[in-house]
Every structure is written in structure tokens, then in C-alpha cells.
């Protein structure tokens, strides 16, 4: 990490044109933002740059328009949100990117913002076009990547642009990298990972890499169903992933080899319907009609004890079908235990993943962790041990 270039307060930015690549890929419904987390976490840095009288050029994407204009994927609602909530002196840019655009960025007043329409409306963005990247670079004097969540992509506004402009990582990007290092390298042991989600296959590389480096692996959510079935347990009509056996076998083998304890649920809140009420059952009581939808109290106690004995915890994936409040208690209990131990100063906690954030969004624990990652795929790829393309190009 010491070989990466990051933004610092020593950098002279007054009257400079700063191209800031952000991730405003927020959930939207009928042009209304459903979750503004990704906006809120970068707003302090945005305000700082404005106060320092930089001229800001904001680039972001929304969804996958495949290089074509799509009104449903316009960033205008985000522009309106920034303008209304934070009272920025901000303009929205929807034209082609050419010499006239350069003139517009030069004409910005110190502290003024020019917010570009969805950068993925240009097909050259996802093609990582060198010519398009060169054109983008001419819009500014300094480039800052504050979109760690997109940095596993080779795209022009993240990757090739750095060839043509003085480039740095932003403070949020730096914090994401530091939090990954807290899990993989500079770790306070014991290290425990709580992994959920529905598919083992999508996280097999992450789990395999983590198993070599951590002390405890706790499997929750629908992913745990696959492990229980592999162990010969009855799981009824619970969600499973076909063909997951080979992945589970590999995880068990790695866990034994690297002395990593694997924990699975002992009891459950079940139903015969996703929209139904909760019916508590222990493992031996499950029958062919049951659907496992949350962990039970004994499992919560087990996980809490592991958390209490840990110095570092990484959590990715809810413990149950939280969309139905009858099956959210396990996830909330985990969040509460991690948050309280973090607050006491005895735990480093990294929490990430869209579903994990969504499951605890309305609790009082959302801001109580050492680091809350919104990075999704990029974070998981880093945990696999991969070097992300848009990070690699920020090296000295």
C-alpha cells in the first residue's frame, strides 16, 4: 500500500480542476433514490474539496446502459439530490465530451461543480478506450479515484485515464484498502469471518483465500444450507445451490490444513412459506416441508461467543431472509454484538456487501463498525488476493 499515491492535504488544489471518479450507482425507483449511502459516505470529501476552492468535475455511472442513453439510468436525480440537500453550486452536463467541454471546465469558478451524466452512456467508457480516456483527462489537472467499488473494472474513467493525468486515490478508497489489509495482512488475531449469501460458488475463491489466513469461519444464510446438506442433514425445501459439493469439500480440506474452525447453524427459524410466520426448530427437528429462513437463538449465542473471543471480524452476507421481518432477528443480533464490541474498543470490524448493508440499514448499528464497505465485488475480489486494475495504476 505504501507504493500507492493517495490524496493528501499537502496537495495544492485551489483553482485546480479536479476530476473525481465516484460511485453513485445507487438503487433508484421511478427516478427516486432508494438508498443514499453511497452519496453520504463521499459527501464529506466532496465538501472538503469545495471548501478548498477546487473546481470539481464529477464522473460516475449508474447501471448498465451498454453505451446508449437510457432515461431510466440518468444521474439527474443524484444531481438534484446533491443540489437540494447539500446546496452545492453545481451544474449538470449532458453534452458530448469535446473541446467545448474543456472550455466549460476551465470556466468553472473555484468551489463550483460540473456533474456529468452517466459516463457509461459513452460506449468507449466500458471499452477502456485510450482515446476517450485522453479526452477525459483533458478536462482536469488532477484525477482522484474515489470509487473503490468499481476499481475491479478496466474502464476508461478509472483505468486508462491515469496514463494522461496526475492521479491519486481518495480517502474512502484508501480506507477500503486499509480494511482489506486488516483482514489479510496486518490482522489482530483471532480473526473471524461471518459469510452468508445464497451461493457458495460466487464466494468460493474468497472463502478459500480467507480460510488460509483466519481462525474462525462462520457460515450463515442460505449458504449454510449447502454445508448442512453436505453433512447429511435434513434441510427440507430450503434454498440450495446445485453442484456446490465440490466447493464445500475444498473449503473443509483447507480449513483442516490451516487450522481454521468452521461453524454452522445449530437451530433455525423456519416456515413453509417465504411470507409466513416463524417456527423455531433445532437441527434434528427439521422435516421435508421446512424452509430454513433464519438462524435460531442457540446459533446466535454461538456466533456471539466467537465474536467476543475475536480481535478482528469480517462480516459479509445476512444470516436470514431479512426481507420478511420475522426472519431478520439473527442478522440484527449479529450486528448488535459486533457494534457493541467495536464500540468498547476491543474489536476491529469490517462489514460489507449490499445485502448486509440493506439488512441493517434501519437499525441503530449501521454506523457503529470500524469500516462499512459499499464496494461489493471489488472488495470480494481483493479478499481473493487479486490486484484490482484501477488500483494498480495508482502506483508511483
Image (cartoon, helix red, strand yellow):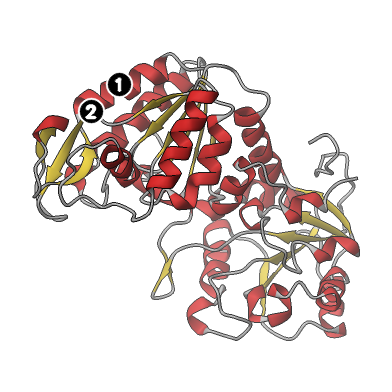
Up/down of 369 relative to 176, above or below: above
Task: Report, in whole angstroms, how far the alpha carbon at label 2 lies from the one at label 1.
Answer: 9 Å
Residue 285 location in percent, x, y?
A: 9, 33
Element under label 1? helix
Check contact, mark 2 vs mark 1: CB within 8 A: yes
Horizontally, is 147 left or right of 2 in the view?
Answer: left
Q: What residue sits right under mark 1 in the picture?
A: 302
Give the crowd class for mark 2: few <14, some 14-19, many >=20 residues within 10 Å.
some
Question: Front-most of 18 and 229?
Answer: 229
- Discs 2/1, front: 2
Q: Earlier in the sequence, mark 2 or mark 1?
A: 2
Does the image show residue 368? no
Q: What residue sits right under mark 2 in the picture?
A: 266
Residue 46 location in percent, x, y?
A: 68, 52
User: Which quarter of the rendering shows the N terminus?
Assistant: top right
Question: Front-most of 36 and 326?
Answer: 326
The quadrant in which residue 67 appears is bottom right
The quadrant in which residue 227 appears is top left
Give the crowd class for mark 1: few <14, some 14-19, many >=20 residues within 10 Å.
some
User: Which quarter of the rendering shows the C terminus?
Assistant: top right
Up/down of 328 relative to 340, above or below: below
Does the image show residue 277? yes
Horizontally, is 10 left or right of 322 in the view?
Answer: right
Residue beneath the point at 74% across and 79% down: 124
Amino acid at each position: 500500500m505504501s507504493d500507492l499515491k493517495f490524496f493528501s492535504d499537502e496537495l495544492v488544489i485551489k483553482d485546480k480542476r479536479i476530476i473525481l471518479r465516484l460511485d453513485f450507482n445507487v438503487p433508484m425507483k421511478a427516478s427516486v433514490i432508494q438508498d443514499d449511502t453511497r452519496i453520504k459516505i463521499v459527501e464529506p470529501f466532496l465538501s472538503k474539496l469545495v471548501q478548498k476552492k477546487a473546481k470539481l468535475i464529477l464522473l460516475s455511472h449508474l447501471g448498465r446502459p451498454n453505451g446508449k442513453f437510457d432515461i431510466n439510468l440518468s444521474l439527474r436525480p443524484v444531481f438534484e439530490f446533491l443540489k437540494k440537500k447539500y446546496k452545492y453550486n453545481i451544474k449538470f452536463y449532458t453534452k458530448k465530451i469535446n473541446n467545448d467541454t474543456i472550455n466549460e471546465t476551465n470556466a468553472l469558478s473555484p468551489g463550483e461543480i460540473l456533474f456529468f451524466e452517466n459516463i457509461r452512456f459513452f460506449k468507449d467508457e466500458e471499452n477502456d478506450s485510450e482515446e476517450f480516456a485522453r479526452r477525459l483527462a483533458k478536462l482536469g489537472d488532477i484525477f482522484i479515484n474515489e470509487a473503490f467499488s468499481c476499481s475491479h473494472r478496466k474502464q476508461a474513467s478509472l483505468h486508462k485515464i491515469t496514463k494522461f493525468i496526475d492521479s491519486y486515490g481518495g480517502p474512502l478508497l484508501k480506507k477500503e484498502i486499509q480494511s482489506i489489509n486488516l483482514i489479510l495482512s496486518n490482522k489482530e488475531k483471532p480473526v473471524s469471518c461471518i459469510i452468508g449469501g445464497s451461493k457458495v460458488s460466487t464466494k468460493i475463491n474468497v472463502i478459500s483465500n480467507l480460510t488460509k489466513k483466519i481462525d474462525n469461519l462462520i457460515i450463515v444464510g442460505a449458504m449454510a444450507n449447502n454445508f448442512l446438506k453436505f453433512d447429511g442433514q435434513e434441510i427440507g425445501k430450503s434454498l440450495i445451490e446445485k453442484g456446490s459439493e465440490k466447493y464445500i469439500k475444498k473449503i473443509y480440506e483447507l480449513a483442516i490444513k490451516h487450522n481454521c474452525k468452521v461453524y454452522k447453524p445449530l437451530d433455525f427459524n423456519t416456515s413453509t412459506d417465504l411470507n409466513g410466520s416463524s417456527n423455531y426448530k433445532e437441527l434434528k427437528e427439521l422435516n421435508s416441508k421446512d424452509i430454513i429462513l433464519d438462524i435460531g437463538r442457540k446459533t446466535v449465542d454461538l456466533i456471539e461467543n466467537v465474536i467476543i473471543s475475536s480481535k478482528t471480524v469480517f462480516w459479509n452476507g445476512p444470516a436470514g431472509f431479512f426481507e420478511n421481518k420475522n426472519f431478520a432477528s439473527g442478522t440484527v443480533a449479529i450486528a448488535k454484538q459486533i457494534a457493541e464490541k467495536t464500540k468498547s474498543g476491543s474489536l476491529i470490524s469490517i462489514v460489507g456487501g449490499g445485502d448486509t448493508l440493506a439488512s441493517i440499514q434501519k437499525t441503530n448499528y449501521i454506523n457503529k463498525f470500524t469500516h462499512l464497505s459499499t464496494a461489493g465485488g471489488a472488495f470480494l475480489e481483493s479478499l481473493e488476493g487479486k490486484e484490482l486494475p484501477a488500483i494498480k495504476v495508482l502506483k508511483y
